[in-house]
Amino acid sequence: MSFTKRILYMLYGYANIAASMLVITLPEEASQMIIFVLTVSLFVRSIQSFIYYFNYACYMVGGVRILFRGILLLDFAIFLNFVEKTSTIISLGYLIAVFCMEGVLEIIHALDAGRFQAKGWKLDFALGLMKVIYAVVSLFYINSLKTLSILYAVALLNSAWRKFAMAFQKPKLTAIQ
């Protein structure tokens, strides 16, 4: 991992910590800001997926997955933008569903990596399971914005911990024989 990538992961971690503190202190205003930031980030990630697909992945085996991911992220961004204008509870429910789906996909990816005896599959499985548990617990408190804010802040702190861990992990060296 390059030095720039490490700095970027550190900045993501600090941004997640700042966002979690904002969510805890101002749950009403912070939920609208977070929904806006997530909408913009989903849109940007979809554009990045499209650019990557049309430059590189269209020539790769299985590169169509990247195109489908870009389409799905764009759909999520557009839908979240429209839902955000109608109701905060509906948009938070949608974010919970996206968070749960992200956890399920991470679990599937970890189980797939575990079949090939990859090293970090247990950590990925545990973190995906934590995302699903956060989403399920959030469904029980969908009407309480304060409780949802605390749960989301805990999830953001978990994400910050993961970004810091990725920034400080030792680089993997591969030997070419």
Image: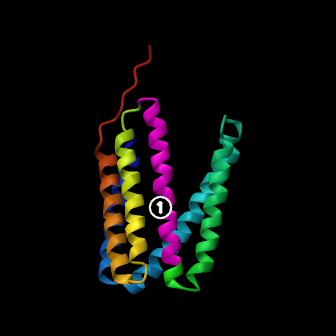
Up-down: is 4 above or below 39?
above
Horizontal side of 168 relative to 134 (left or right) equals: left
Up-down: is 87 above or below 94?
below
Identity, as a three-letter code, of the amino acid under mark 1: Cys
Horizontal side of 57 relative to 149 (left or right) equals: right
Q: Tell me, yes or no, if residue 56 can be seen here.
A: no
Q: Main secondary structure of the magenta part?
A: helix
Where, quadrant-wise, is the N terminus in this rendering?
top left
Q: Is residue 151 magenta?
A: no
Taking depth in this image into account, of 157 and 170 the one nearest to the observer is 157
Q: Tell me, yes or no, if residue 166 can be seen here.
A: yes
Q: Is residue 108 magenta?
A: yes
Task: State the image coordinates of residue 134 (x, y, percent, origin top left).
Answer: 38, 64
Which SS class for mark 1? Answer: helix
Q: Residue at coordinates 32% horizontally, 63% vertically from top-left?
A: 14
Q: Residue at coordinates 51% horizontally, 66% vertically from top-left?
A: 97
Q: Residue at coordinates 41% horizontally, 29% vertically from top-left?
A: 117
Q: Residue at coordinates 40% horizontally, 25% vertically from top-left?
A: 174
Task: State the image coordinates of residue 112 (x, y, percent, origin top left).
Answer: 49, 38
**Magenta residues (range):** 91-117
The scheme the figure's colours follow is rainbow
Which class describes the residues within 10 Å of circle 1: few (<14), some (14-19), or many (20+)?
A: many
Horizontal side of 101 relative to 73 (left or right) equals: left
Residue at the limit of the structure toward the front, as seen here: 140
Q: Give the number of callouts.
A: 1
Task: State the image coordinates of residue 26 (x, y, percent, origin top left).
Answer: 34, 84
Task: State the image coordinates of residue 92 (x, y, percent, origin top left).
Answer: 48, 76
Asked where in the image residue 44 lies, by quadrant, the reply is: bottom right
Residue at the limit of the structure toward the top, as seen here: 177
Q: Which residue is mark 1?
A: 100
Where, quadrant-wise, is the C terminus in this rendering?
top left
